[in-house]
Image (tube, rainbow, N blue to C red):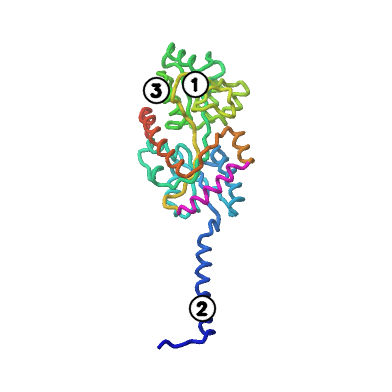
Amino acid sequence: MLEKRPFHTFLLALCCAATAILPMANSAAAAEKFPDRPVMFVVPFPPGGPTDAMARVLGAELTKVLGQSVVIENRAGAGGNIGAEYVSHAKPDGYTILFGTSGPLAINQSLYKKMNYDPRTSFAPVVYVGYLPNVLIVRESLAVKNVQELIALDKAQPNKLSFASSGNGASSHLAGVMFNELAGTHLMHVPYKGTGPALNDLLAGQVDMTFTDILTAMPYIKAGKVKALGMATARRSSAMPEIPTIAEQGLKGYDVSVFFGVVAPKGTPEDRVQALNQAFTRVLDSDKVKRMFADQGLEASSDRKPAYLGSFIQSEVTRWSSVVKTSGVQLD
C-alpha cells in the first residue's frame, strides 16, 4: 500500500525540483548568448591598405549591431597566408573571424608550394561582401584608345609593351597573364614591390600599363594622368560606368577582380555562423556602409548566404589554378 503524503509535502518537493532545474536553464541560456565578449576580426594584410580600411568600417558598424567590440587584428605576411592560417587553426567558437580576399581564399592555393590550410575545407563561410573591380590603365602618351588598338599595337611591335604588377603572383600579374592568353599578346611583365611603386613608374612612363583596382586608379583616370582602356570584370563598374569592360571589347570571359569574404574556422557552430551572417547583412545593408563602399568602387554582393561564399571559393580556386599554372610562378 502506497504511503499517503500530505499535499504540502508534495508541493514542497515540486518547488525544490523546479529550483534545481532553474540554474541549469539559466546556464543554458547564458551559453547560447553570442557574442558575450569581443570578437577578433583578422585582416591578413598590413594596416593602411584598402582591405584594412574596409575591415575597420565593417568592424565599427558590427560593434553596434552585436553589442560587443569587434577588434581588428592585422596579421600580415605571405600574401595573406599568415593571417588566414591563424584563423583556420583558431578555436571554432565564432570569436575569431577572417576578412579574406582573393589571394588567401583562392589564388594562393595554387601559387604557394606549401599551404598549412585549404580555403575550400579549413573554414566555415560566413558572408560574401563583394568585389573591387580591376581596370586596365595605360600611360597617357601611349597611342591607343581601346583594347583592340592595344592588341594591334602589341602584334605590330611584339615583346615591346610592358605591364607592371605589384609582385609575382599578385592579381595584377595574373591579370596580365590572362590577358596575354586570351588576346594572343606578348605583354612583358615587370614586377614591383607593391602597387605604389608600379603606379609611380607608370606615371613616369617607365612601363606602358598596369591592371589595378578601381579605387587606386580612379583619381588618376579623372585627372587625365592615365587612360583607362577597359574594366577587367564581367560587368561595368558602377563607380565609372562609362568605361567598357575588356570582355565587351572582344576578350570574352575576361574577369579579374579582388573579392572580399568573411570566414570563421571550420567547425564553428551553425547558429553562430548564422548570427554573424545576419549581423554582417545588417551592416552591409545600412545606407552608411552602402554609400562608403560605393564611393570606393566596391561592388556589393547580391547573395550573402554562407553557402554562396563556400561555392564561390570552390570555383575561384579552380579558376585561378589554371592561370597560375600558365604564369609558371610558384612561391615558397
The mark found on residue 181 in the picture is: 3
Distance from the alpha carbon under mark 3 to that under mark 1: 17 Å
The answer to whether 296 is drawn above or below residue 44 in the figure is above
What's the amino acid at mark 3?
A: Glu
The mark that comes first in sequence, 2 or 1, is 2
Q: Position of residue 47 (x, y in %)?
A: 55, 42
The answer to whether 305 is drawn above or below residue 12 in the figure is above
| Crowd band around label 1 with a 10 angstrom C-alpha radius: few (<14), some (14–19), many (20+) | some
The mark found on residue 248 in the picture is: 1
The mark that comes first in sequence, 3 or 1, is 3
Q: Position of residue 227 (x, y in %)?
A: 56, 20
The answer to whether 297 is drawn above or below residue 149 in the figure is below
Magenta residues span 269-286
Q: Residue at x 50, y 22 (%)?
A: 209
**Could you tell me which secondary element the residue under label 3 belongs to?**
helix
Residue 138 belongs to magenta span? no
| Crowd band around label 2 with a 10 angstrom C-alpha radius: few (<14), some (14–19), many (20+) | few
Residue 284 belongs to magenta span? yes
Query: Which residue is the site of mark 2?
Result: 14
Q: Position of residue 220 (x, y in %)?
A: 60, 25
Q: Are marks 2 and 1 in contact (CB under 8 Å)?
A: no
